[in-house]
Image (cartoon, coloured by chain):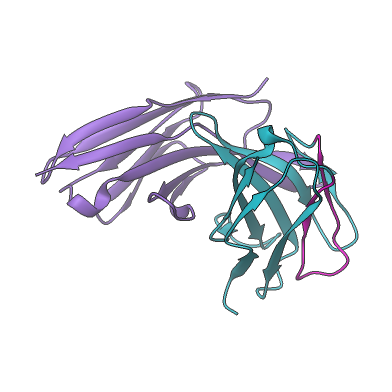
Amino acid sequence: IAGITQAPTSQILAAGRRMTLRCTQDMRHNAMYWYRQDLGLGLRLIHYSNTAGTTGKGEVPDGYSVSRANTDDFPLTLASAVPSQTSVYFCASRETGGLAYGYTFGSGTRLTVV
Amino acid sequence: GQNIDQPTEMTATEGAIVQINCTYQTSGFNGLFWYQQHAGEAPTFLSYNVLDGLEEKGRFSSFLSRSKGYSYLLLKELQMKDSASYLCAVRTEISGGYNKLIFGAGTRLAVHP
């Protein structure tokens, strides 16, 4: 693994189902983020984690939950998916206390809720 | 509130110069980023400004005026591969020295022969 790995790459999900998007990084970055990207709206922050064991809410947290049990993993869970959660989801990480431009993005998960 | 504005679409000719503008109004400012994103791919870092002035990096330059809440990305000697979306993002503090990026909606640039 080099950088950030997201899985799955894409998924079609029935409304009401539970889904966990996986994000793993091997750079030992402290801070991790989940964004969703929708046409015309850009990237919007869902949840973030500054260090293992801590999480916080971003701009659009409703319907999503996260956990940060260790430094490397930051899964995003949709408890009961709805069509408005159809989007492309990007995980990102950053080394805190380091250089200013340490944000690294994963390749994204394209989720369609039907 | 948080507001970052940039044009939705731009077109330019191969070999030309294009300037993509970004204006922002955010509660807090801790640097401005430009990212490039090709269709279906992840954003990749282009430039970072935290002080006023111009940062040059090869064919790409970025300018910042904090007093005006304004930045631009300048792309010179345009190539077809520069066709992509360009994302302006402002870094703001969450708490305790940690921060987050707030993104504009992005500018889709189409480069024509």
Residue A24, horizontal then vertical, whole percent: 70, 69
In the picture, residue A81 is in which quadrant?
top right
Q: Is residue A99 left or right of residue B81?
A: right
Residue sitting nearer the eye, B8 or A114: A114
Q: Is residue B13 magenta?
A: no
Image quarter where the N terminus of chain B lies is top right
- Magenta span: A62-79
Residue sitting nearer the eye, B53 or B106: B106
Figure chain in purple: B
Q: Name the outermost residue toward the bottom.
A: A1
In the picture, residue A83 is in which quadrant?
top right
**Would you say the magenta stretch is mainly helix, strand or loop?**
loop
Residue A111, horizontal then vertical, whole percent: 62, 48
Figure chain in cyan: A
For the point 82% across and 42% down, the residue is A80
Residue A35, horizontal then vertical, whole percent: 65, 45
For the point 79% across and 69% down, the residue is A71
